[in-house]
Image (cartoon, grey):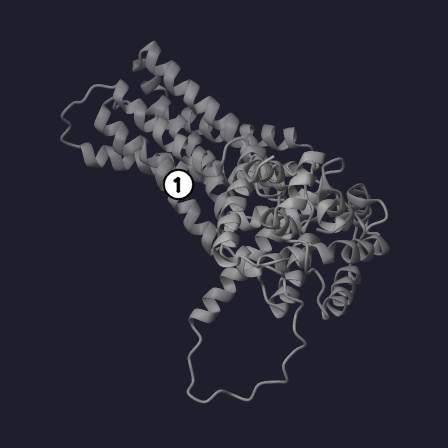
Amino acid sequence: MDGGVVCLHFKERTTRDEGSEAGAGGFEQLLRSYQKGDAAAAAELVRAVSPLFVRFCLGHGDSAQDVEDVLQEIWLRVHKARHTFRPGAPAVPWLYAIARHARLDARRRRERFRSRELQVEVLPETPAPQPPVPAFQAQELLNGLPEAQREVLVMLKGCGMTIEEVARATSSTAGAVKQKAHRAYRRLRAGLKRTAAGWRP
Amino acid sequence: MNCDEFDRLAAAAAPLTEEALRHLRGCPVCSSLAALGRQGGELPGVAAAERRIVAAITADLKPVRPLAPAWVYVLGVTVAAGVAAAAGILGLGVRGWTADSLTQRVYFTACLVAGIAVGSVNLSRLMVPGAPPVLQPRVAAVLATLLPAAGAFLYPAAHDTRFLQTGMACLSIGLGHAALACGLMYRVVRRGALLSRPAVVSGLALLSALAGVAVLFVFCPHREMGHFSLGHSTVPVAALGLGAWIGRRLRPR
């Protein structure tokens, strides 16, 4: 067991905050400047928050191409809804609430599109394969969770959000978030025990 | 500490105690669980995507005025509902209200006032991403459809040969006033974010329907259980269905 895993909660906060000099408080300041039309603040916000959105999407098992598309969609929505951020409100739930809906809409669109695709007998020529995406370890286990539980776990563990932030981002309550996380843990634990006696992270 | 206790601690996102750390060191399953979600987050194409995004959003970046405080929208929506209801009552009269008993008046007035108050707060929160609603939209929908329906039992059952005609007339009056309220409310909340379109449009429709039900409650002279069930209680249900249908067909802004 290494120290990185042991200091999980403290490191998660650092992971989220490292994109911005001032962390979550910095996001709020950047959002306020963005509302005032400050292009430099907008650029810094994109650079600071995009890795978190990527982590969020990867945590749900989205492919690299999908993640790029969703990232653009998320920022388009953030841009259009930037006036709805109220100064003094927490920035992280505001950002993730938009990201969450954009990702869900994109996934529904993809599923609709794929359901209409026709199978052909001879595969068309495909471009050279993209470099493999770094695997999200234990992604299969996460993918086996119901959407709501996975979402909570990814926000808590992958994005380093607090219970209250997740509750706000998902329009839920802190109690419901804790319950979903607890259920997710129970399912993951059962999956871990069942599938891999020798499995190690 | 056992594994269950560790799960509870981790689910609460609480800092790990000494005892939890000792458990982690000795339990491979818990340490695997604790490591979940820590990997990933880097993609080769993201830097280029970020550059494209920055270029796109800074190209025509203009200052925007943040939304007004929530109470402004709560007040605005409540006033819009009140104006639509008042317009209907002034035009149609108060024959229903004068025929009612105190119990019937108190029940419906309390339901409508509480419904409009909670609905307007909910709607003002739906305008802002990451603002938790007072009531979950599904719960609000169930209450707003069940409470007027339950109120029908306060009235006697009677045989009415024109049951269908009077019921449909009241339904159309209720929906007409709901449409008026909806138009006014939309003027108030149109600057809000439209994250979940079905939820926002259904919420708007449901709140508008309460204004329609208020008009019917004060105006309608048919104080009879069957008529209330068909002509009045179906207004929120129809508005909710219509709102959900429209919400699903709206394109993202």
Kind of residue sitting beneath label 1: Ala
Residue sitting at the far front:
B26
- The answer to whether residue A64 is left or right of residue A19 is left
Q: Which residue is mark 1?
A: B239
For the point 72% across and 36% down, which residue is it? A89
Residue B82 seen from this side: no
- Where does residue A186 sit, x and y in percent of width and height? 51, 44
Label 1: state its secondary structure.
helix
Quadrant location of the C terminus of chain B?
A: bottom right
Residue A109 to residue A78: above or below: below
Residue sitting at the far top:
B102
- Where does residue B60 sit, x and y in percent of width and height? 77, 60
Residue B124 to residue A101: above or below: above
- The answer to whether residue B129 is left or right of residue B54 is left
- Front residue of this view, candidates B194 and B105: B194
For the point 68% across and 54% down, which residue is it? B38
- Where does residue B129 sit, x and y in percent of width and height? 63, 43
Quadrant location of the N terminus of chain B?
A: top right
User: What is the chain identity of the residue bearing mark 1?
Assistant: B
- Where does residue A78 sit, x and y in percent of width and height? 68, 53
- Front residue of this view, candidates B232 and B220: B232
For the point 71% across and 49% down, which residue is it? A5
Residue B183 seen from this side: yes
Q: State which quadrant residue A91 falls in.
A: top right
- Front residue of this view, candidates B170 and A158: A158
Q: Residues within 10 Å of mark 1 (few under 14, many from 20)?
A: many
Q: State which quadrant residue B79 falls in.
A: top right
Count of number-bearing discs: 1
Residue B223 to residue B9: above or below: above
